[in-house]
Amino acid sequence: MTAVRTRPLKEFAVPDGLVGGPLGSRLGKRDFVPEGVPVVRGQNLSGGGYFSSTGLVFVPAARADGALARHLAIPGDLVLTQRGTLGQVGIVPAGIHDRYVLSPAQARIRVDPDRADVRFLYYCLLDPGMVALIRSRAVTTGVPHVTPDILGDLPIPARPLPEQRAVADVLGALDDKIAANECTAETCLQLADASFAAAPAGPPQRLGQVAELHDGPHATPVKTASGPWFLSISSLDAGRLDLAASAHLSEKDFASWTRRVRPRAGDVLFSYETRLGHAALMPPGVRASLGRRMALLRAKTPAAGGALLLHAYLSPAFQDEIGRRSLHGATVDRLPLGDMPGWPLPLPAEGERAGLSARLDALHASAAQTAAENRTLAALRDTMLPGLISGRLRVGDAARAVGETG
């Protein structure tokens, strides 16, 4: 097969369109204010290419439009990490904020629309081969980083603009389905939160009366490319389990690491060190071992099922309990697992409990189903992406496969 002709990334940008974030001490935590112009940080980008507006911080508008004006990104710009977790990329969304300030760890590419479709470049930068290339070219002294010049020299397939758009349309259709599923899941979880908050409160019960507590392993196995999941406390994300932040282990290690306890659907997973207060519900259809610094709660009766326990754990009252009873060490804070069964857990009135538990379980099951569908869709997108970008996979064949996903 003939090698794909490429052009450097900088040739697809407008003049001065490739800019890094402010260097040195020109932007730090002391500069953040409650309102103003948002700052794009690594946590607003994910390895999957999504742009998240959660956890935004702000700088004064006068500073953003003054000293930091050269480091602004506007809707339609590509933003990617140039320092730290290389490989993160996203397109600045429209309709939320009219401009963003780059953090020192981010870079911005303003694409010339007559030369490239921004979505095509976005998918080029998501290609695992491109991510590996970026990391191989990184300066490894201190925190791994790449300069705008290194980014500008990245090789991009020189596809005609109509072909770029066709490729982006196919991959974008999958991402649109993923986004729609994400909205459905978020709505389910918001309804669950509202249902728990609105339920009449009963007297608190000791945690050990309604749930078993199991500790996880105290070591880390050898990570593998595939296999059962070895969960990470970083996967505990606002009540949901984000498997993208976890790793895999071998079948042999899985048997050893689950000898004490094997997580099952409906268990409440939580961190007992460092990320105190974080918890998530174990979804169905996932084979996993607890990771280090993780434990789980297992409901003793359906009347207080896993989803109900999760919301009770995440409730302000129990979070306050965690804050009061945590042990503060020299290096990390931790929960005294041996004492936790005696802690008071806020629960709805007994007559409300069974019905509410069933509703919460149903809402979380719906959210888990959409998450499973999204993992399938993301796997299909990631499989197609390199072939579509390079032209080895025909757009028509890929479009038919996407259509069959429903």
Image (cartoon, rainbow, N blue to C red):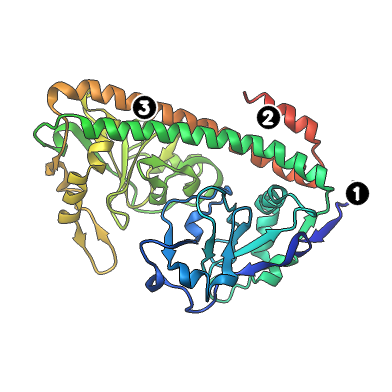
- The disc label shown at residue 402, or none: 2
Residue ID for mark 1 = 2
The residue sitting at 30% across, 35% down in the picture is: 193
Q: Work out whether mark 3 precedes mark 1 in sequence or the reverse, and give the earlier one.
A: 1
Question: Is residue 302 in sight in this rendering?
Answer: no
The image quarter containing residue 347 is top left
Frontmost residue, 59 versus 45: 59
Label 3 and label 1: CA atoms lie apart by 51 Å
Question: Is residue 347 in sight in this rendering?
Answer: yes
Q: Residue furthest right?
A: 2
The residue sitting at 53% across, 50% down in the picture is: 51
Q: Is residue 178 above or below residue 17?
A: above
Amino acid carrying mark 3 in the image: Leu
x, y (%) of residue 91?
Answer: 60, 52
Question: How many labels were placed on the picture?
Answer: 3
- The disc label shown at residue 320, or none: none
Q: Quadrant of the C terminus?
A: top right
Frontmost residue, 347 versus 285: 347
The image quarter containing residue 74 is bottom right
